[in-house]
Each structure stands twice: as C-alpha cells, then as structure tokens.
Amino acid sequence: MREQMQTRLEALRKEFETGQAELERVERQRTYLRETVLRIGGAIQVLEELLAEGQPTEPNGAKAYADQPVTNLANEDTAQQARLRRE
C-alpha cells in the first residue's frame, strides 16, 4: 500500500510540474497577446486621428506611411509567435 502511495505521489509531482510549466507558458502568451492588442489599438488610434485631420500626404507631397507601424507589428508578432512555439 505504501509503495502505491509513493508511486502515486511521484506521478502527481510530475503532473504538477508539467502543469506549472504549461501555466507559465500560457501566462507569457497572455502577456504577449495583451501587449499586441494594446499596440494594435494604439496604431488604430493614430490612424484614426490622422484620417480625422485629413493628412493624406507628407509635407513634401509623398504618401504618408501610416501603415508602416502596423507592418512592423505584424513582423514582431510573427517573430514572437515563433519564440513562443519554441518554448
């Protein structure tokens, strides 16, 4: 009986460690997603403000690169997702 309890205890400890590691991974992913949503929200706000001001071009007549931060966000998101998959 004691040997069965010891075996079960060891199995539960392993399961607990696995659960803790998974929880940490999910928390990191949650933090990353929250930060991503905040960045996207900020990009949306900036673009909405620029559109409301009616500034379609830069002072030299070139097109504004308002979508550049969004593009950078997509690249950052892809890199971060790759890092999270490796963890």
Image (cartoon, rainbow, N blue to C red):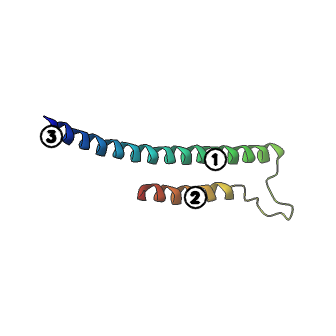
Q: Residue at x 65, y 48 (%)?
A: 39
Tell me, yes or no, whether the two marked residues, 2 and 1, touch with CB atoms within 8 Å: no
Locate residue 85, reporting x and y percent: 42, 56
Dot 3 crowding, Cα within 10 Å, few <14, some 14–19, many 20+ = few
Farthest residue to the right: give it. Answer: 59
Q: Residue at x 74, y 43 (%)?
A: 48
Please indicate whether residue 80 sits to the left or right of residue 86 in the image. right
Which residue has dot 1 on it? 40
Locate residue 36, reporting x and y percent: 59, 48
The label nearer to you, 1 versus 3, is: 3
The label nearer to you, 3 versus 2, is: 3
Q: Amino acid at mark 1?
A: Ile
Q: Is residue 85 above or below residue 12?
A: below
Farthest residue to the top: give it. Answer: 1
Mark 3 or mark 2: name the one nearer the start of the chain.
3
Tell me, yes or no, whether the two marked residues, 1 and 3, touch with CB atoms within 8 Å: no
Which quadrant holds residue 74?
Answer: bottom right
Locate residue 49, reporting x and y percent: 78, 44
Q: Amino acid at mark 2?
A: Glu
Q: Which mark is residue 76?
A: 2
Which residue has dot 3 on it? 3
Q: Which mark is residue 23?
A: none
- Spatial distance from mark 3 to mark 2, Cα to Cα? 51 Å
Please indicate whether residue 30 sits to the left or right of residue 39 in the image. left
Mark 1 or mark 3: name the one nearer the start of the chain.
3
